[in-house]
């Protein structure tokens, strides 16, 4: 397996092997992220391919320290965009909607006249909140809402019982809602 | 009719608006600190602790049977007839043990409703799968120190943690049945809960002295709330103090309130069938007699009857909590002569919990 540094060197050298090496090293990882959001092979494949293109355009000048995460985040964003476009008209069904329903619990009640917090500020607050969670709870939370993994996948990954995972997520969502309310956040 | 349609449209729009906002929140996760994601990935790679047992559960009986046959064959062929019984007995014993373990796991899975309730409530009492042993209790050291009066978080969700809730299988939906501070908040709009420091909690008149001064090793204070009148008149209002400590996935909820004894399920300690967790298998709905349902779910023991023995009967450890802790868990309340009720929900050995109750007054 080619190391990240070597792959990045290929990008910097504008060598097209960078794409195939990235595909070999992180194809499954990115596909998994896209799949959990889209639940559609074709769409997931396209998102992964778009990820390579984005990476190609971003490196250089960029040189990410955590290459996997860099790619995963691109895939995640592309998949979310695609999902949103696909579900603009009807609500549909699937894991994403479950996750959205769950996160709906975290949204603090706000006055409609108040202005919604900026995306960057929301990210900053979310990070701050995640740092307050115990490590295991935080990991479970991220597995669910970053990777969009299903409950049983998370349970299997950490060798936990399904209901322990559900309990942990339920608690974390409650804490997040309370945290956002305390910060006076309007989403 | 028009109103009905309008309401439906409003509901639909509200649904979309919530989706939009939830989606924003979901998008915000993309900006999570890299080290958090990296840590998450690292942890996710950890070899599952029960992989061996899962293999054993899957193949154990077959392997044991083959081993048994081989042993019998070898011994018979060798003419060691006397040893046959021994050898097969040993192999069968190990097979039975493995199958027994397997069955234990399966049995747990066979009671999903009760289990889900147990897992979801987390801090509520469970059923017997493994008898509590005093050895495990004695191995834990109590921190006999006065708890620090540090400022605590003020998230109401921490109080919410004290609420019992049921998880609906697979759907991820939850039904909450409010209890503790939350229920008071819900039924009495003139009451509100407020996060306070531990030092402030000690000073709450009539309730503060029921805060334990020891806690099981490793537990850290997570939150302290006082339920008071919305006007802030704490002296004349009925109050409740709720404290929460956590230790990884373990937690302890400690609620102190003034209650009317007539409303409580006070147990007769001689009638152990009304509160002894070890007498009933999961699911409780099928094993606990209907006439005991209420008292069994929240038994209140008078302080004069309260003993370590009572605590032992309420704290139970659940075997096979993969990924979870095997610390005994339980719930009960103690009624003191001045009408104060201390409610305990959480995890710890009976000795530890008893120490907590013995540390005040």
Image (tube, rainbow, N blue to C red):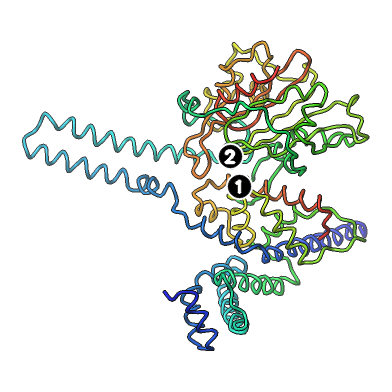
Picture coordinates of residue A108, whole percent (x, y): 81, 53
**Could you confirm whether marks 1 and 2 are on the same chain?**
yes
Circle 2 residues within 10 Å: few <14, some 14–19, many ≥20: some
Q: Earlier in the sequence, mark 1 or mark 2?
A: 2
User: On what subunit does the disc labeled 2 rest?
Assistant: B
Which quadrant is home to the C terminus of chain A? bottom right
Q: Residue at x 28, y 33 (%)?
A: B93
Which quadrant is home to the N terminus of chain A? bottom left
Q: Residue at x 47, y 35 (%)?
A: B319
Picture coordinates of residue B156, whole percent (x, y): 77, 42
Between B141 and B126, the residue placed more toward the observer is: B141
Picture coordinates of residue B20, whole percent (x, y): 78, 64
Compared across the picture, whether B258 is left or right of B116 comes to: right
Direction left: furthest residue: B79
Compared across the picture, whether A159 is left or right of B260 comes to: left
Between A79 and B30, the residue placed more toward the observer is: B30
Picture coordinates of residue B330, whole percent (x, y): 60, 29
Mark number displayed over residue A78: none
Mark number displayed over residue B169: 1
- What residue would you read off at disc 2? B113
Between B203 and B174, the residue placed more toward the observer is: B203
Circle 1 residues within 10 Å: few <14, some 14–19, many ≥20: some
The reply to whether discs 1 and 2 touch (Cβ–Cβ < 8 Å) is yes
* CA separation in Å, label 1 and label 2: 8 Å
């Amino acid at each position: 397996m080619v190391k990240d540094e070597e792959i990045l060197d290929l990008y910097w050298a504008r060598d097209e092997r960078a794409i195939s090496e990235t595909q070999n090293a992180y194809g499954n990882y990115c596909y998994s992220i896209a799949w959990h959001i889209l639940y559609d092979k074709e769409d997931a494949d396209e998102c992964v391919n778009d990820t390579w293109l984005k990476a190609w355009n971003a490196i250089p000048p960029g040189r990410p320290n955590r290459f996997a995460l860099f790619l995963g985040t691109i895939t995640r964003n592309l998949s979310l965009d695609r999902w949103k476009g696909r579900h603009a008209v009807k609500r549909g069904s699937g894991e994403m909607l479950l996750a959205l329903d769950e996160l709906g619990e975290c949204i603090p009640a706000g006055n409609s006249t108040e202005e919604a917090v900026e995306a960057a500020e929301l990210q900053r607050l979310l990070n701050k909140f995640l740092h307050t969670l115990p490590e295991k709870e935080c990991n479970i939370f991220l597995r669910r809402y970053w990777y969009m993994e299903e409950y049983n996948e998370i349970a299997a990954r950490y060798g936990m019982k399904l209901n322990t995972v559900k309990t942990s997520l339920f608690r974390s969502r409650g804490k997040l809602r309370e945290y956002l309310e305390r910060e006076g956040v309007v989403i | 009719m028009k109103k009905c349609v309008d309401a439906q449209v409003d509901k639909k729009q509200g649904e979309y608006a919530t989706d939009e906002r939830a989606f924003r929140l979901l998008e915000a996760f993309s900006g999570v600190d890299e080290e958090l994601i990296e840590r998450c990935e690292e942890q996710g790679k950890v070899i599952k602790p029960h992989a061996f047992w899962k293999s054993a559960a899957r193949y154990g009986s077959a392997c044991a049977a083959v081993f048994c046959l081989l042993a019998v064959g070898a011994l018979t062929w060798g003419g060691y007839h006397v040893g046959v019984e021994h050898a097969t007995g040993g192999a069968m014993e190990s097979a039975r043990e493995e199958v027994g373990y397997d069955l234990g796991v399966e049995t747990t899975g066979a009671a999903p409703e009760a289990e889900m309730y147990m897992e979801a409530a987390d801090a509520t009492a469970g059923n017997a799968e493994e008898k509590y042993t005093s050895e495990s209790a004695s191995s834990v050291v109590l921190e006999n120190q006065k708890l620090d009066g540090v400022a605590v978080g003020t998230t109401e969700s921490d109080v919410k943690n004290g609420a019992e809730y049921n998880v609906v299988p697979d759907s991820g939906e939850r039904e909450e049945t409010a209890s503790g501070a939350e229920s008071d908040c819900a039924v009495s709009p003139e009451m509100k809960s407020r996060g306070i420091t531990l030092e402030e909690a000690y000073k709450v008149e009539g309730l503060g002295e029921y805060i334990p001064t020891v806690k099981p090793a490793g537990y850290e204070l997570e939150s302290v709330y006082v339920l008071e009148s919305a006007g802030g008149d704490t002296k004349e209002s009925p109050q409740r103090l709720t404290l929460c400590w956590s230790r990884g996935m373990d937690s302890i909820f400690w609620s102190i309130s003034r209650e009317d004894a007539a409303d409580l399920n006070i147990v007769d300690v001689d009638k152990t069938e009304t509160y002894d967790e070890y007498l009933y298998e999961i699911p409780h709905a099928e094993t606990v007699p209907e006439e005991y349902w209420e008292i069994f779910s929240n038994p209140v023991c008078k302080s004069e009857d309260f003993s370590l023995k009572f605590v032992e009967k309420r704290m139970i450890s659940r075997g096979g909590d993969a990924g979870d802790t095997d610390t005994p868990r339980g719930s009960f309340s103690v009624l003191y002569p001045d009408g104060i009720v201390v409610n305990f929900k959480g995890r710890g050995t009976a000795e530890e919990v008893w120490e907590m109750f013995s540390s005040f007054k």
